[in-house]
Amino acid sequence: MRDGGTVMQPSWPIYVISLRSATERRARCADALARLGLRFEFFDAVEGAKLAAEEVARLYDPRKNARVYKHALSRPEMGCTLSHYSLWQRISTGDAGGAFLLEDDFQAEPGLAEVMAAISRASLKNCMVKLFSREPAGGDEVGELPGGYKLVMPRHVPGQTVGYAIDSIAAARLAAKAMPMARPVDMDIKHWWEFDVPVLMVQPSPLRVNVQQTGSSIEVAREKKHVGGLSRAWRNVCYQLAYNAGVRANRKRERQHLERLQAALRSADGR
């Protein structure tokens, strides 16, 4: 989407979450967004390894974690969650109406700028719009976006928070219930009914990620936490059963949100 030969900027700010010390990643992100003509701001990520013990005790609930997730959280997972949480707080009290959050291992498709501009100008209140999924996300179609992209409401929300849009209402709801943390941020968002913030997906994904190329301390730490034999297997089974039960129990709410967001997108398109 261009206006007089210039890239139409999203009406919401773009934040790239990155450790201050990650100079190579930051340079790669800056180059990718500059090629698309997109303005952005780096947000210094919380370094989980440097969290003091008293901060962990205040911000992390190990008892709840044992009930609702597959393994204890690693320090990098805690830092990632706190980074997103801090931005949710900023977005919820800001006057922009929403924002785009990107983690620094993203790779951008050429249509990203158009997609961002369309999402920020739509009337999609109280929802998150994910810009990345590893696999195609099946579900109900919400509407169309420029460049052949579509918005879909998936039955099972994919993990990872490589990139997404969030409006100020949704950010406030997530921030209000995110602490103390008990699941990684991407797994928490999958349980959208706990926040009453539905999640949409852009399909096909306008972002890509290459963990082998960029590396991921969170993925490495997550794999280490996954060692644990029968205990790990049992917690994983319990988690999956509880998640699937939550999806089934909230079908009606899902349908209500779907119809609301379909109507909002039609209104934004003037239909």
Image (cartoon, grey):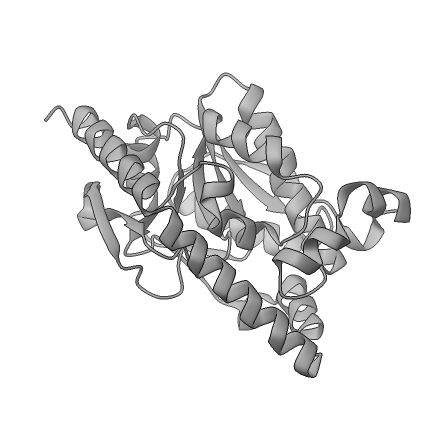
User: How far across and down, in percent of the image, does residue 26 sit?
Assistant: 60, 50
> Number of numbered discs present?
0
For residue 152, side relative to residue 14 (left or right): left
Q: Quadrant of residue 197?
A: top left
Residue at position x 66%, y 70% from top? Answer: 220
The residue lying toward the viewer, choosing from 98 and 66, is: 66
User: How far across and down, in percent of the image, does residue 227 sit?
Assistant: 70, 78
The residue lying toward the viewer, choosing from 29 and 264, is: 264
Residue at the far bottom: name it.
229
Residue 151 appears in the picture as rendered? yes
Residue at the far top: name it.
95
Q: Quadrant of residue 137?
A: bottom left
Q: Quadrant of residue 91?
A: top right
Residue 131 appears in the picture as rendered? no
The residue lying toward the viewer, choosing from 104 and 155, is: 155
Q: Is residue 209 above or below residue 7?
A: below
Residue at position x 84%, y 46% from top? Answer: 57
User: How far across and down, in percent of the image, does residue 179 sit?
Assistant: 68, 39
User: How far across and down, in percent of the image, does residue 86 sit?
Assistant: 65, 34
Q: Is residue 5 above or below residue 189?
A: above
Residue at position x 66%, y 75% from top? Answer: 232
Residue at the far left: name it.
271
For residue 254, side relative to residue 48 (left or right): left
For residue 11, side relative to residue 143 (left or right): right
Q: Is residue 222 above or below residue 97?
A: below
On-image quarter of the N terminus: top left
On-image quarter of the C terminus: top left
